[in-house]
Image (spheres, rainbow, N blue to C red):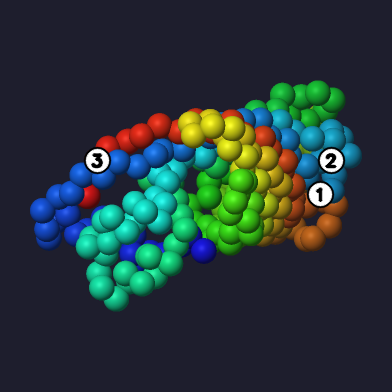
């Protein structure tokens, strides 16, 4: 599990209390195409809606954490040393994905989804990395259609993601996965505050398949 807020807070706050230490860690930048399937009415008009998937994270492996374990309070050091890897995502401003899908038949949409918090459960850690994660998401998407009134989808939700990462070299990786996003239902063609149901006339589930290319480079900073 990669989420450990007390340890992360300690790493960020301790520089104010102690002399700085230089640290060099690999940063992983991922980008690639995504396709979105909407359960219900939208998928009958068009099978899938296109988008772009992003990821940005600093990779802190076990050896790097051990080398700087003095920056972690003693009560959290055992937890930190038990990690094989921790991925620190430095900003919530970068969206997890954007939707850019012009009309092919009757419906088009443009928007973005943010994923500010997630819990990651590693399933495999050998030649490839296989992870199952659960995240909090927030989505805004403008949907325009010849079949119904324009919809401003604005909803929080949760997701379940299966992510398979395949190293090609030390600096280049390929990943693919599936993401199921579950929202507070919003009626298609309805306004932001109109609740829908778990039926074909509402937006409550979006499935996403994605492929990403990952580029890794070293970044040096003081902590």
- Residue drawn at x 45%, y 33% is 216
The residue nearer to you, when weighing 143 against 127, is: 127
Callout 3 environment at 10 Å: few (<14), some (14 to 19), or many (20+)?
few
| Residue 143 image point, x, y percent | 69, 36
Secondary element at tag 2: helix
For disc 2, the marked residue is: 43
CB contact under 8 Å: marks 2 and 1:
yes
| Residue 174 image point, x, y percent | 62, 34
CB contact under 8 Å: marks 1 and 3:
no
N-term mark: 1 or 3? 1
Q: How many marks?
A: 3
Secondary element at tag 1: loop
Q: Quadrant of residue 153?
A: top right
- Left or right of 43: which side holds 178? left
For disc 1, the marked residue is: 39
| Residue 33 image point, x, y percent | 66, 30
Quote the CA–CA distance across marks 3 and 2.
Answer: 46 Å
Callout 1 environment at 10 Å: few (<14), some (14 to 19), or many (20+)?
some
Q: Quadrant of residue 111?
A: top right
Quote the CA–CA distance across marks 2 and 1.
Answer: 6 Å
For disc 3, the marked residue is: 221
The residue nearer to you, when weighing 98 against 191, is: 98
Of tags 1 and 3, the one toward the viewer is 3
Residue 47 visible in the shown view: yes
As drawn, the residue found furthest toward the right would be 44
Residue 143 visible in the shown view: no
N-term mark: 3 or 2? 2
CB contact under 8 Å: marks 3 and 2:
no
Quote the CA–CA distance across marks 1 and 3.
Answer: 45 Å
- Residue drawn at x 58%, y 61% is 121
- Residue drawn at x 78%, y 42% is 37
């Amino acid at each position: 599990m990669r989420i450990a807020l007390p340890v992360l807070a300690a790493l960020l706050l301790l520089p104010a209390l102690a002399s700085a230490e230089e640290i060099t860690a690999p940063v992983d930048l991922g980008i690639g195409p995504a396709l979105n399937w909407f359960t219900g009415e939208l998928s009958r008009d068009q099978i899938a809606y296109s988008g772009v998937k992003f990821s940005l994270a600093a990779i802190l492996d076990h050896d790097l954490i051990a080398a700087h374990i003095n920056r972690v309070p003693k009560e959290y050091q055992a937890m930190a040393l038990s990690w094989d890897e921790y991925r620190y995502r430095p900003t919530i401003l970068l969206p997890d994905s954007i939707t850019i899908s012009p009309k092919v038949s009757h419906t088009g949409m443009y928007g973005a989804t943010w994923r500010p918090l997630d819990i990651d459960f590693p399933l495999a850690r050998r030649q490839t990395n296989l992870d199952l994660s659960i995240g909090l998401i927030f989505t805004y998407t403008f949907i325009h259609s010849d079949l119904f009134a324009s919809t401003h989808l604005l909803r929080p939700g949760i997701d379940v993601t299966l992510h398979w990462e395949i190293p090609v070299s030390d600096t280049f990786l390929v990943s693919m996965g599936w993401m199921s996003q579950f929202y507070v239902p919003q009626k298609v063609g309805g306004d932001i505050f109109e609740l829908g149901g778990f039926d074909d006339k509402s937006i409550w589930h979006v499935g996403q398949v994605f492929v990403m290319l990952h580029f890794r480079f070293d970044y040096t900073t003081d902590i």
